[in-house]
Amino acid sequence: MSINKLFENKLNVVNIGLSSFKEALDNAGAKSVQVDWRPPLDIDPDLLKKLKAKLPAIEEANKEAIDRILRGHPFLVGLAKAIEVIPNMHENLILHAGPPITWDRMCGPVRGAIVAALIYEGKAKTKEEAEALAGSGKIKFAPCHEHQTVGPMAGIVSASMPVFMIKNATFGNLAFCTMNEGLGKVLRFGAFGPEVIERLKWMEKTLYPALKKAIAVVEKIDLKNIIAQALHMGDEVHNRNRAATSLLYRMLAPLIVKTCDDKDVAIKVLEFISGNDHFFLNLSMPAAKSVLDSARNIENSSLVVAMCRNGVEFGIQVAGTKNQWFTGPASIVDALFFPGFTKEDANPDLGDSAITEPYGLGGTAIAAAPAIVQFIGGNVSDAMNYTKLMYEITVTESNAYQIPYLNFRGTPTGIDIIKIIEKNILPVIDTGVAHKDAGVGQIGAGLVRPPVEPFKKAFTALVS
C-alpha cells in the first residue's frame, strides 16, 4: 500500500505497549487489539549461557517429572489424628502454611489460627496465654509441606486435629490435610472465638468418627475421577468446589447412613457437608500434593512441586533443587471484598492451596470455572485468556483434567520456572482473603499473581 493512501483506509491497530494506549484508541472508535507481551526478565548473561549448556539435561529431567505427575493417582484412604500419621508430628509442634517463618514474623491471621489451635488443644485458655506460650520457645513451628501436609489459608495443623489421608496409588506416597471448617469466622482465616473452638471440637468428636467409619467401608475413594468430573461441571477445585463437594456427598451419604448408629448425628454430619461448598478443597489440595511429591528430587528438573504463602512470604520448591525454599514478598489479592471491608483490610496472600496450580487445577484451569472471575469484575473471556496464558508457562496438558470451554483441551500442567523467566509470565492463582488482624476471619476472594523473586532465585540455583 502506498503511504499516500495509508490514512484513506480504516485503521486496524495492534498495540504491544501500555493498555492505556488501547483505551485511547477504543475511545476514538479505532479497531484495536491488545497483545499481552512482556519483555524477558533481566537475567545475568552468564546464567543464560549455563542454561543453554544444561538445557538438554533439564528437558530430559522434565520428561521424567511430568510422566510421574501425569501417572499419579490420588485416593482418599481414610482419616486419623495428625499425631498418629503425619511424619515427625508431636504434641508441641504446630504446622503452618507457606515457607518457614518464626512467631515474631508471622502475620495476624496465622497468629490468630495458632491461638485457636492452642486453645483447642487445651494448652491455653485465653488469647493472652496462647500468645505467651507461642512466643516462649516451647511450641515449635514448621511448614506443612515439610511434613507431607498442606493446609488452606493459615494452614494450621496441631496434634489432635483429624486429617484426611490421601495415597498416590501409583507411587505409594501419602499426603495429609485437615477437614474444611466452612467459610467466614474459622480457624484457617485467623479466627479464634468460642464458636471456632466449639466447631473444631464437634469436627473432632462427631464428624471425624462418622467419616472414618463410612470411608472404611469402601476403603478408598478415587479423587482423580471426582476432580475430572468436577471440571466438567464448573469447578476448578481451588476457589470453586461446589460440584466436587456434591459428587463426594453422593458417595458419602449412603455410607454415613449405613454406618452411623445415631440418626441425629448422621443428619448433622450430612447437613454440615451439604452446607459447605468448600468441603472438597481439603481433598483437592492433598491430592495435588501427593502427586507433585512423587516428582520431587529429580536432578535438573525445572518443574515447580510446591507453591505456597504464609501471609508474609510467597515460597516455591522445584523438583531439581532438593527441597530448597525460594521466597519473595507475598502479594495483595485483587479481590471482591465482603461489605464493610476494603483492600486496606486485607492480609497479603496466604495458604498452601496454591499447590493446585502446578497440578493443572485452580487458577491454571480457571477457564473451567468462569464464574470465579466475577470476584474481580471479570467475564468469561477473561477466564479463557487466563488459562490460555498458563499454557505458555507449563510443559504439557493434563491427560485426565479437561476444560469443556476449550473443546475439552487438557488443563495446563507442570509449571516450569524456565518458561516463567523466558516469557515473564507469572502463574494465576485464585484464592480467599483473610483480614490482616487476628480474629476477624475471611473478608473476600479473588485472583493474585505471585512475586517474581522466588522464580528468579530458583532459576539461579538450578542452572548455576
Image (cartoon, rainbow, N blue to C red):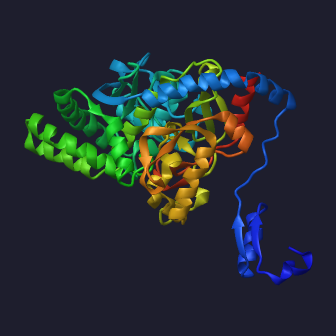
Please provide percent x and percent y for residue 403: 44, 50
Name which quarter of the figure residue 152 lies in. top left
Please provide percent x and percent y for residue 388: 57, 51
Is 349 rendered above or below residue 120? below
Is 169 rendered above or below residue 310? above
Nearer-the-camera pick, 442 or 413: 413
Q: Would residue 240 appear left or right of 48 to someone viewing this image?
A: left
Nearer-the-camera pick, 274 or 202: 274
Q: Residue at x 66, y 34 (%)?
A: 417
Let me know if residue 191 appears in the view: no
What residue occupies the far front of the structure in this picture?
Answer: 1
Nearer-the-camera pick, 293 or 262: 293
Q: Residue at x 59, y 21 (%)?
A: 323
Q: Would residue 17 appear left or right of 407 to someone viewing this image?
A: right
For the N terminus, give its image quadrant. Answer: bottom right
Please provide percent x and percent y for residue 18: 77, 63
What residue occupies the far right of the structure in this picture?
Answer: 4
Q: Residue at x 68, y 43 (%)?
A: 451
Q: Would residue 300 appear left or right of 2 to someone viewing this image?
A: left
Is 369 rendered above or below residue 364? below
Number of disc labels:
0
Please provide percent x and percent y for residue 298: 58, 19
For the C terminus, give its image quadrant. Answer: top right
Let me know if residue 332 appears in the view: yes
Name which quarter of the figure residue 17 lies in. bottom right
Q: Residue at x 69, y 34 (%)?
A: 418
Q: Would residue 421 appear left or right of 450 to someone viewing this image?
A: right
What residue occupies the far top of the structure in this picture?
Answer: 88
Is 302 rendered above or below residue 39? above
